Structures are given as C-alpha cells and as structure tokens.
Image (tube, grey):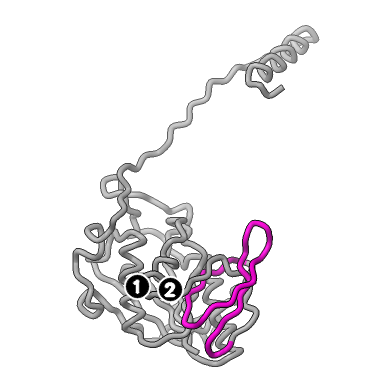
Amino acid sequence: MRIIVPIKQVPETNAVRMDETTGTMVREGVEAIVNPLDLYAVETALRLKEAHGGEVIALTMGPAGATKALREAISMGCDGAVLVSHKAFAGSDTWATARVLAQAMRKIGAFDLILCGERATDGDTGQVGPELAAFLDLPVVSYVGAIDGLSNSTLRVRRLVEEGHELLECDLPALLTVVKEIANPRLPTLQGKRRARLASISAWGPEELGVAGEETGLKGSPTRVVKVFRPKIARQCEKLVAADEAGIEAAADRVVAFLKEKVLL
C-alpha cells in the first residue's frame, strides 16, 4: 500500500503576520511548525503501514525551509518526502495550491490513499484536501474519525457529523481528511531523527511538474484577499459607584433598567 500525506508548515499562532498590500501571510523570518492537524493524518498513515505494509510519503509545498516539516514527518516514520518549492508558487490560494500538489502526486506515481489533515491552522479553510480529490478525480471522505476496514480495493470509514457518525465505504484510490479523534500522533524517536537528518528530500519546481506560471501563485489564484485590517474595538462603559446603601440601591436599579433596555430581562 502506498500512502501520500500532504502536510503544511504553518506559523506559530502568536507569530502570524499578514502583508497588507498583497493580502498574503508573511512566512519569511517567522517561527514555523508542522500544521498540528496534519500530524493526525501522518499518524493514521503510519498505523495503516504497520498493519498492512507499504510506504508513506510526505509532501509539502512551501519555501526551502519547509524541509524542516518534512524531516519531522520522516522522524515519525514516513519513508520519504518531497518538497514542492519555487518563487512562482508564492501567494497561491487553495485552488492553485491543490493544482500544484496534484501534479506532484502524479509525478510521485501510483498510490492507494491520500490522507490530509482536517484543515490548516493558518488559513482554516479545509479546502485543499477536497480540491486535490477534484483535480485527481478521486472519491473523497471528509471528517473521518476512524478507519474500520481496509482491503485491496475498498475502505470502510466512520465520518464525524453533527448527529454522530456516518458509516461509509469507498473505492480505492481515495482521499480522506481526518479529525483528531482518529489517533494520537506519536513522538519522533531518536533513531527516526537520525534517519530524517540524513534523508534525501527531492525538490520540484514548475519545470519538473509541468505547471505553467499563470496557473500558480497570485496569477493562478481565482480568490483574492482584497483587504486586511485590524478590527478596532470601542466600548462605551457606564461606571456605577456604590459607596453607601443608597448608592447600592441606585446601582441595582440602574443595572435592572439597563438589562431591560437591551431586552435581556
């Protein structure tokens, strides 16, 4: 069984910065980590490999520094990794990103399963996984909380929904997006870290993938962030001072009146 796990390197939550001119996230010089939700997909892939044999390949699109995220995936147990990186890819929205990643998966070759995290913590859209399935013409099951069965040609899963779980079966190859309930990510081992440090990671750009410039980056993105701003919070407060018994009674009356004005009482 061959499994591909797309992962993303994202900024630490407290280090997120936006370029107000382009509407894109500033990634250079920012502390970055593997998207935490992608680690559940990595763990699921590794458990499937341990149970059924095969190979797990991590894939990411980003700057050269994103190899750090790939090496972390290898240290957890992934067999190989591919970096998709070029300045032409900068500023890609989810659609352009999925287009490039789909080309990379075609170049990797035949696979049985693609496992994605539910969403990335920097964009929070949850769109790249299903868009990948669209580009690759694959069945997709989102919000998978458990894999109940796997054969050479089919997969049985439990999908998390508002009312509980849906039991679904789909043909392979397929793409799944997984949620936290599916597994607890393992920690890298010392042996895994040594293997990751020595691992050779392929790097592919537009030429290797056969992707035209107008299909990637800002030019190839059908969506735009037209404005970035910081919301201004203005509060008009009324301060009540209750220094004596009469003041307490007056303050209580005012609080009750205020709640009635707001139709809260």
Indicate the amino acid at tag 1. Answer: Leu
- Residue 157's image quarter? bottom right
- Residue 169's image quarter? bottom right
First along the sequence among labels 2 and 1: 2
How crowded pointer 1 is (Cα within 10 Å; few <14, some 14-19, many 20+) is rated as: many
Q: Is residue 186 above or below residue 112?
A: above
**Magenta segment, which residues?**
151-180
Q: Nearer the viewer, residue 72 or 168?
A: 168
Task: Determine the secondary structure under disc 2.
Answer: strand
Task: Determine the secondary structure under disc 1.
Answer: helix
Q: Is residue 74 visible?
A: no
Does residue 141 show up magenta in the picture?
Answer: no
Q: Which residue is label 1 attached to? A: 101
The circle on residue 63 is none
How crowded pointer 2 is (Cα within 10 Å; few <14, some 14-19, many 20+) is rated as: many
Looking at the image, residue 117 sits to the left or right of residue 106; the answer is: right
User: Where residue 254 appears, x then y in whole percent?
Assistant: 69, 13
Q: Residue at x 42, y 68 (%)?
A: 8
Indicate the amino acid at tag 2. Answer: Pro
- Residue 211's image quarter? bottom left
Name the chief secondary structure element in magenta.
Answer: strand
Q: Residue at x 25, y 78 (%)?
A: 209
Does residue 178 show up magenta in the picture?
Answer: yes
Dots 2 and 1: beta carbons under 8 Å? Answer: yes
